[in-house]
Amino acid sequence: MRIGVGIDVHEFVSGRKLIVGGVEIPHTMGLKGHSDADVLLHAISDALLGAAALGDIGKHFPDTSPEFKDIDSMILLRHVGKLLEGEGYRIENIDSMLLMERPKIAPHVTAMRQNIADCLLIDVSRVSVKATTNEKLGYIGREEGAAAHAVCLIEKK
């Protein structure tokens, strides 16, 4: 068995859609990034890649590559799942935490969990998505950005 940890941070900006966990969430701002800036899927991807010692998302999907400009992060997560499958790993579980002051995430958690499970071809019961505010502290509390943390357990088949 192997454990992986992933963390990602993105800045809020005007003029972009807010995509989290593969779900478009109505909000006045979106997250800035080379891809769709899905902070949650990026943290999960990094956790999975790290658990398998396959590097990180920057190695596999560099932000200098036009190929990944504005790409849907669900495509990236699917690719990560295929990489793990190719290495003979099975995903046992993913536990993730989104840190964002606004908007409320709870109404979207079920869809996020299902998106993640579908991308990775695992049962939704193996995917946890939680959210919390930062109690108005720091860049998250000032609504300047969002962060996500993820932990996963994988094992060889």
Image (cartoon, rainbow, N blue to C red):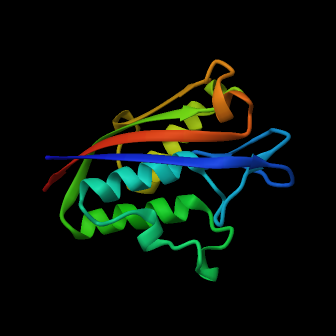
* Residue at the spot 50% in from the left edge and 53% down from the top edge: 42
The image quarter containing residue 123 is: top left
| Relative side of 153 to 61, left or right | left
x, y (%) of residue 150? 41, 41
Q: Is residue 23 visible?
A: no
Does 70 sit above or below residue 25? below
| Relative side of 84 to 103, left or right | left
Hey, which residue is sitting farthest top in the picture?
A: 135
Quadrant of the frame with the C terminus: bottom left
The image quarter containing residue 29 is: top right
Q: Nearer the viewer, residue 52 or 82?
A: 52
Q: Is residue 69 visible?
A: yes
Hey, which residue is sitting farthest front in the picture?
A: 138
* Residue at the spot 46% in from the left edge and 48% down from the top edge: 43
* Residue at the spot 60% in from the left edge and 52% down from the top edge: 38
| Relative side of 60 to 22, left or right | left
x, y (%) of residue 69? 66, 73
Q: How many marks?
A: 0
Hey, which residue is sitting farthest bottom in the picture?
A: 66
x, y (%) of residue 17? 78, 51
x, y (%) of residue 136? 69, 21
* Residue at the spot 65% in from the left edge and 30% down from the top edge: 138
Does 116 sit above or below residue 136? below
Q: Nearer the viewer, residue 101 or 103?
A: 101
